[in-house]
Image (cartoon, rainbow, N blue to C red):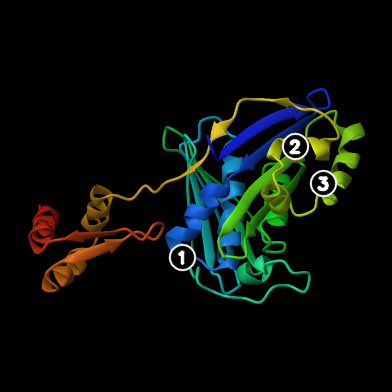
Amino acid sequence: MTDYRRKATAAHGTLRIIAADMAGTALEIQRAHQAAPVAAAAMGRLAAAAAILASDFKNPALMIVEVEGDGPLGRVVAEVRSGGKVRARADHPQIVLPLRPDGKLAVGQAVGSQGVFKVTREDPSGALYQGQVALVSGEIGVDFAQYYTLSEQIPSAVAVGVLVGTGGEVAAAGGLVIQALPGSQEYIEPVIARLGRLERISHRLAGGESIEQLAEDVIGGPLDWFAKEPIYYGCECSQTRSLEILSSLPRAELEALIEDEGAEVVCHYCHSAYRFSLKQLEQLLIQAAD
């Protein structure tokens, strides 16, 4: 197992920890979009947030986390399916922005600070649950903590990070959430202080520390860890799904595609292209008439 998510408890069960190490997944997302560093960081952070959030619910079939701000990156979306399959996209993944004065990637500027952080959860029965909060900074981590506290009513401290190496590709990525449960009052303040001093989570992961070591550093001692859960990059697109998309088009749009003698559906997540012949489109038109 390479990328994974892991849960733990501490302080006699009054603190809950969810950690994710997902450098490989973030790198695959970047490569799928040929994304510039700041976009790769934003998508990687949001993917980590989605992977962590998906562990908070029992058997979610699909978890969609999106940020839509007023920055040049546009809408950023990350999806996690049951089993740990992750994919993500951004409206404008090739944008390039100068580094911040402190040398960090300008994720907040790319996303923007005006907008929404939205979560959609689908359970195995197909029922949908949605919640959203206003963006705080566009840095993803702060916005994720805001969502937990306001929408899920769980006071949480969050750290998410993506390190893009000198070659321009993701070298490390991960996230850490610490949640205060009833009875945690005497433990939570020093934990929050240590989390605030946690320097660049992605740099420490790239330096060889495990996500478990970082969590134990923040908590100030050993944790009761549960089993690792796999996280991996994968896309849901296919020829069949693309055909279903075409079949849902209005009759006039199908007729226009027939005049073009064919159609191509390109996935927004992995950029795979699916070609459909004139004969296939004519058959869809016949089905629409029926």
Viewer-side label of 1, 3: 1
- Residue at the spot 69% in from the left edge and 39% down from the top edge: 210
Measured as percent of width and height from the top left, residue 93 is found at 50, 68
Q: How far apart are marks 1 and 3 (CA)?
A: 32 Å
- Helix, strand, or loop for circle 3? helix
Most foreground residue, 151 or 146: 146
Q: Which of 209 and 239 is in front in this view?
A: 209
Judged left or right of residue 264, residue 170 is: right
Tell me, yes or no, whether the two marked residues, 2 and 1, touch with CB atoms within 8 Å.
no
The circle on residue 195 is 3
Q: Mark 3 is on which residue type?
A: Leu
Q: Distance between the residues labelled 3 and 2?
A: 13 Å
Residue at coordinates 62% horizontally, 50% vertically from top-left?
173
For discs 3 and 2, the disc positioned in front in the rendered view: 2
Q: What residue type is labelled 2?
A: Gln
Mark 2, residue position: 213
Q: How far apart are marks 2 and 1 (CA)?
A: 32 Å
Q: Residue 34 carries which label?
A: 1
| Coordinates of residue 117 in the picture (x, y in percent) | 61, 57
Visible residue check, residue 177 = yes
Q: Nearer the viewer, residue 289 or 55?
A: 55
Instruction: Provide residue 225's location: percent of width, then percent of height.
Output: 69, 26
Label 2 neighbourhood size at 10 Å, few (<14), some (14-19), many (20+)? some
Query: In percent of the image, x 24 and y 51: which residue is there?
Result: 239
Q: Which of marks 1 and 3 is nearer the N terminus?
A: 1
Task: Tell me which corner region of the image, top left, top right, bottom left or bottom right, holds residue 73.
Answer: bottom right
Q: Which residue is drawn at 42% across and 37% down?
A: 126
Binning the other alpha carbons within 10 Å of mark 1 as few (below 14), some (14 to 19) or many (20 upward) gives: some
SS for callout 1: loop
> At which x and y percent is residue 258?
12, 68
